[in-house]
Image: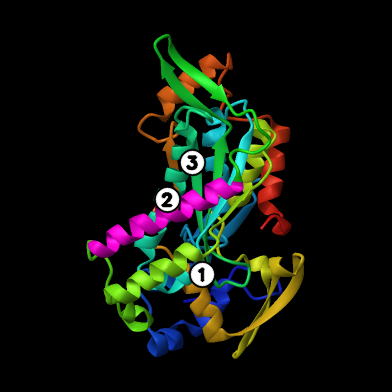
Amino acid sequence: MYHSSKTRNSPELADILHRHEKRYISTYGASVFQKKAIRAISRCRTAALGGHVLRCNHCGATEIAYNSCRYRHCPKCQTSKQLRWITARQSELLPVPYYHVVFTLPHELNPLASYHPEIIYQLLFKAAWATIETLGYDKRRLNGKMGMLGFLHTWGQNLNQHIHLHCMIPGGALSQTDEGFKWNPSQNKYLFPVRVMSKLFGKLFITELEKLYLNKSFNFKGCIADLSCPMHFAKYQTQLAQKSWNVYAKKPFNGAEGGIEYLARYFSKTAIGNERILSADDEYVRFKWRDYADNNQSKIMKLTIDEFIRRYLSHILPDGFMRVRYFGFLASSCKKKNLKTIQSLLNSIPKKHMQSKAKMSKVKETLRTPGGW
């Protein structure tokens, strides 16, 4: 049984998937993970998942609400998860500048990523962190261990493949000398030169890609079948090496508060939110998008139902794949100890988990605002 609980007039992603799932899957097929996503999202907050009763402790008024699917790709189930995660991160924020760095893969890697998403996404995390780690240990730079949070996004505003990693990096490094630990702060308005990061990132990624090829980690078929030939793969590597590997570095955040606003925007973001969908019928879907190649102009895209679903499903991650990861002194195995050491070096008192009501209200408002997505 499917009874939607939505009150907005425009169609939602759940409506589109529910209406067309059987025909789409029978025509084009779908992976186990994609089928799971369709089932969860299309039934979220409907009678199919059951419901619960909310009762006011003061007046006794009751309200029946349908249960949420709590699936990580569902656009309706992220806000509470975001708030819990952000609250838990409060004590981990340091009183230092935070840098926002974005590592983007060349679109020539999209076909390979379509057949082997987990391998390519893992490699993106690995190469991005290796870039920051290598430059961080450079004695001419910070000469120590850095920390990084990485958020994987695989989409662009038009829902096409645009694989990139948003990174939040504290401005400094932890080093150990004969006298003990030392905090080496970043002295620049930028973390590292963009050209240096771009060149190193591309080199590290291609080197690791070749290792995977030699270890026969790929199953070449379909549009990438020709890459099974060593000569063709070598040519492919050359083409990648000649590309401009895009690393974008924004200005540093204004300490912890800026970091919170960043987390609110990027944590658990889905490929498309319901607020962007304008209309949907039996043939087409219309949704809002921003064209960054055209001065960030707001535009309307019209796709066939099948193409819209195909694009959306291409961003469903396998179960268990962590799209938010921690590195360096922020790695889970040593984060608590390292942060205590750094906070001591900075003569900083760890922040309490809960911020003031005013600050948390600001975070909540950021999460609710469609423009923030």
Residue located at (48% from left, 41% from top):
132
| Residue 63 percent location from the top left of the image | 61, 56
Q: Earlier in the sequence, mark 3 or mark 1?
A: 1
Q: Residues within 10 Å of mark 1 (few under 14, many from 20)?
A: some
| Residue 25 percent location from the top left of the image | 40, 84
Please name the amino acid that badge 2 sits on: Ala
Is 236 on the left or on the right of 229, as rendered? Answer: right
Q: Earlier in the sequence, mark 1 or mark 2?
A: 1
Residue located at (62% from left, 25% from top):
95
Check disc 1 and report the residue beneath it.
Answer: 107
Is 204 on the left or on the right of 64, as rendered? Answer: left
Please name the amino acid that badge 3 sits on: Ile
Check disc 3 and report the residue beneath it.
Answer: 132
Is 289 on the left or on the right of 42, as rendered? Answer: right
Q: Relative to residue 312, is residue 144 depicted above or below?
A: above
Q: Taken as a whole, is the magenta stretch helix, strand or loop?
A: helix
**Occupied quadrant, residue 86:** top right
Please name the amino acid that badge 1 sits on: His
**Occupied quadrant, residue 117:** bottom left
Circle 2 — which element?
helix
Foreground residue among 62 and 269: 269
Check disc 2 and report the residue beneath it.
Answer: 127
Q: Which quadrant, please, contains the C terminus?
A: bottom right
| Residue 36 percent location from the top left of the image | 39, 69
Residue found farthest to the top: 179
Mark count: 3
Q: Say whether marks 3 and 2 touch (CB < 8 Å).
A: no
Report whether residue 53 is seen. Answer: yes
* Magenta segment boundaries in residue numbering: 194-214
| Residue 16 percent location from the top left of the image | 56, 79
**Alpha carbon of mark 3 to alpha carbon of mark 1: how far?**
22 Å
